[in-house]
Amino acid sequence: MFWGNKILRAKLPALVSDYHERRLDRGTYKLRVGPEVYVSPTGTPNDPKNKTKLKLDIGDDFVIPAGQFAFLLTEETVTVPFDALAFISVRAKYKFRGLVNVSGFHVDPEFSGRLVFSVFNAGPSEVHLERLEECFHIWFADLQNHEEMGPKIGYQNIPPEIINPIAGEIQSFAGLDSKIKESDKKLTDRMSAIERDHAVVKWATALVLGALLTLGLRECSLSRDTASPPPQTSTNSKP
């Protein structure tokens, strides 16, 4: 059986750190973006968004570009009783922007710690978030005929072992578009260089041909002058 608001109001102060009734929703509780996030690199050189893991102070914001993954640490520490199961989700208003939860949808019994949400921006635009923004839902259900299996320690920060698989370049539409534009620029520059070289060759060829033509005409003129007989002078004879 899922916990309704009355049960949540009674139990959550002992299960969720910094509990506030204002964040109690219709059978769920809102969790906030915490002090650390990681956004996968875009693949664009010198992109200011390539800041990898970020430490956030209160009010600090960050961007998840279109087509990129991110790990988001919650502000709250959550404890799940051994006889309950919790479920998590990204709130609808952020789903409508394209943000999809890909980290799983439940929290194990006896879990205690911060939650790490793995999200993917499947939308066409950047998603802007900031620390303490109420991005997530959590809700609880009872487990029947369940026995204790020992505590499961959660996170206090984003561990490197979950970052490594996506630490490289992600071939997103934005990254591919950037590469296409970069390749197009290189091709355009190369074509311009070839056209300049071709123009220089044409100019040099015309100059050489002009010089050869001038030299040829000069040689012809000198040859003609040499081959012409000297003019004869006529003498008048007396009778």
Image (cartoon, rainbow, N blue to C red):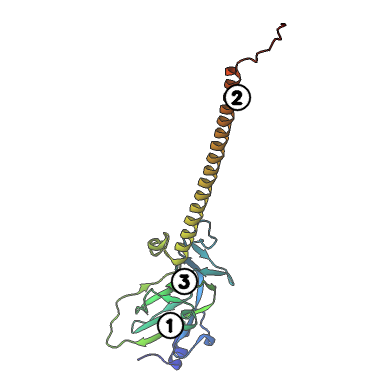
Say if residue 117 shows up in the picture.
Answer: no
Along the line of sight, the residue nearer the viewer: 194 or 8: 194
Residue at coordinates 49% horizontally, 87% vertically from top-left?
A: 24
The kind of residue tagged 1 is Ile
Contact between marks 3 and 1 (CB within 8 A): the answer is no
Residue 221 is labelled as 2
Residue 38 is labelled as none
Disc 1 secondary structure class: strand
Give me the C-alpha separation between circle 2 and circle 1.
Answer: 102 Å
- 2 or 1: mark nearer the eye: 2
Q: Point out the tag, 2 or 1, that comes first from the N-terminus.
A: 1
User: Circle 3 sits on which residue?
Assistant: 73
Give coordinates of residue 115: x percent, y percent: 43, 74
User: Quick one: label 1, few (<14), some, or many (20+) residues within 10 Å?
Assistant: many
Disc 2 secondary structure class: helix
Q: Point out the tag, 3 or 1, that comes first from the N-terminus.
A: 3
The kind of residue tagged 2 is Ser
Along the line of sight, the residue nearer the viewer: 95 or 229: 229
Contact between marks 2 and 1 (CB within 8 A): the answer is no
Residue at coordinates 58% horizontally, 34% vertically from top-left?
A: 210
User: Quick one: label 2, few (<14), some, or many (20+) residues within 10 Å?
Assistant: few
Q: Which quarter of the rendering shows the N terminus?
A: bottom left
Name above or below for residue 74 compared with residue 13.
above
Along the line of sight, the residue nearer the viewer: 70 or 54: 70
Q: Residue furthest front?
A: 239
User: Circle 1 sits on which residue?
Assistant: 138
